[in-house]
Amino acid sequence: MLSVSNINVWYGAIHAIKDISFEVNDGEVVALIGANGAGKSTSLKTLSGLLRTRTGSIEFMGEDITHMPAEKIVEHGLVHVPEGRRIFQQMTVEENLDMGAYTQPRDTIAGNLERVYAHFPRLKERRRQVAGTLSGGEQQMLAMGRGLMANPKLLMLDEPSMGLAPILVEQIFEIIQALHEAGTTILLVEQNAQAALSIANRGYVMETGRITLTGTGQELLHNDDVRKAYLGG
Amino acid sequence: MEFLANLINGMSLGSVYAIIALGYTMVYGIAKMLNFAHGDVIMVGAYICFCAVSYLGLPAIAGVALSVVGCTVLGIVVERLAYKPLRNAPSLNVLITAIGVSYFLQNAALLIMGSDPKSFSSVISLPALRLFDGALTISATAVLTILACVAIMVALTMFTGKTKMGKAMRACSEDRDAAQLMGINVNSTISMVFAIGSGLAAIAGVLMCLAYPTIMPTTGSMPGIKAFTAAVLGGIGSIPGAALGGILLGVIEIFARAYISTQLADAVVFGVLIVILLIRPAGLLGKPVHEKV
């Protein structure tokens, strides 16, 4: 479904992504784990078109999207829920969800909205509330709901558990699993390697801009190097 | 009665500032830049209307329409040629470019129209209204200006609150990258904002010349700076803030001129700005910037 080959990305003078390649197949949950600064978020930003690779290519659903503008990539169904949620703080919950559906035909929006509210009943309760007043967990739900409004074929989630209380982290991962079971393919970037790998079909470990290890979720969970580096021994 | 007349005149002048300030504030909101050439678009708008009516012999309303169209196109072209290439440049570069565009427009006007002031009164003249048996005289221009400002505010509020494009505009203002991830074309949204702002500047230019009927190549600078002040006063980036700041500034200016000193009026206006910014650095309706991590 998504195939990334040999991309190199610079942030100004910093060589942030060094010749990485990976792929996501239809129906999978793929986890991208690694420490702060390993290049996980940079990879997602490159996939969604916010950053550009200097080499290699990115192919999505059989189409070359390497040079496609970000707004077109969304239309193709590759949807990025960014790190730090980045919801529109001054808009209401429902306006945020409307923005998520920006590329969608008008007659499908109401149905999508119901689907999102089914996953996140809290958002329905608060749909007239200004998004900036939501709690951290609710903001994360809104960010994910907003991503779902674009009808993603592949949903990329960047650190969905960041800054949340353990109980909320659990809830967010349950929702990710539910989304997966409902047929959404997911590329998950996480520092919470334990939680991410336990729901992932496959995973990639990133270190300073390179992919250093790959395997199924279970393999990586039980890999000694991964345990030492990311799972606290 | 004199107080009332001053108040109405102040609101009328303030309405012009408000309409100009809307352009500043919307452009700042979305492109995070101070478009110091905005004031000169007013001047271009006034000249277009003047030329259409006195040289081409068109009716006044057609002159206004032509002026709005001309400035809208000018706004889009200036954005595309001068600002878009600098989208990711440091803000100082963009600011200097805007000042450059301002000088360019002024000198282009000087070249084409000459340095002698043109009299706008020959273009459109409206009668004065006498109320209370002649005790209160207000110009129809003042009333028209205030009504135009109200109509523009209502239209903009509906546009940004209800329409898909308007909401996309707000989304871009808040977070450009996130807006792109929604599938919003940021470049065309910015273009649209420049178009709206410049179209409004054209209307402001015509309205201003109805009240102060001479046009020169530098006609736009002072009202441009005052409107910028108004936008900052109201909280730059905020649309209601621009309206409030503009009207407040106009009323203060006229009152200062009537009751304090004609010469000190501008000093009073900018003094008020300084005091308000000391108390509320984000402006009257501006939101203090804080980030939730």
Image (cartoon, coloured by chain):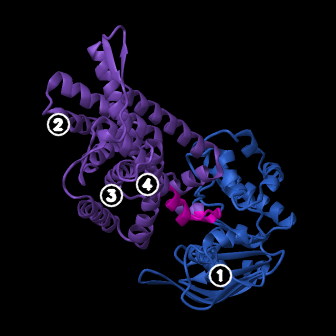
Chain colours: A blue, B purple
Residue type at tag 3: Ala
From the viewer's perspective, is residue B262 above or below residue B237? above
Residue B133 sits in which quadrant? top left
Give SS at disc 4. helix
Residue identifier under label 1: A205
Comes first in the chain, label 2 or label 3: 3
Marks 1 and 3 belong to one chain: no
Q: Nearer the observer, disc 1 or disc 4? A: 4
Residue drawn 58% across the image and 61% down it: B178
Residue identifier under label 2: B267
Residue identifier under label 4: B27
Residue identifier under label 3: B37
Q: Nearer the observer, disc 2 or disc 3? A: 3
In the shown orientation, is residue A153 left or right of residue B177?
right
Identify the chain of the residue marked 2, using the numbered disc in the image: B
Q: Nearer the observer, disc 3 or disc 4? A: 3
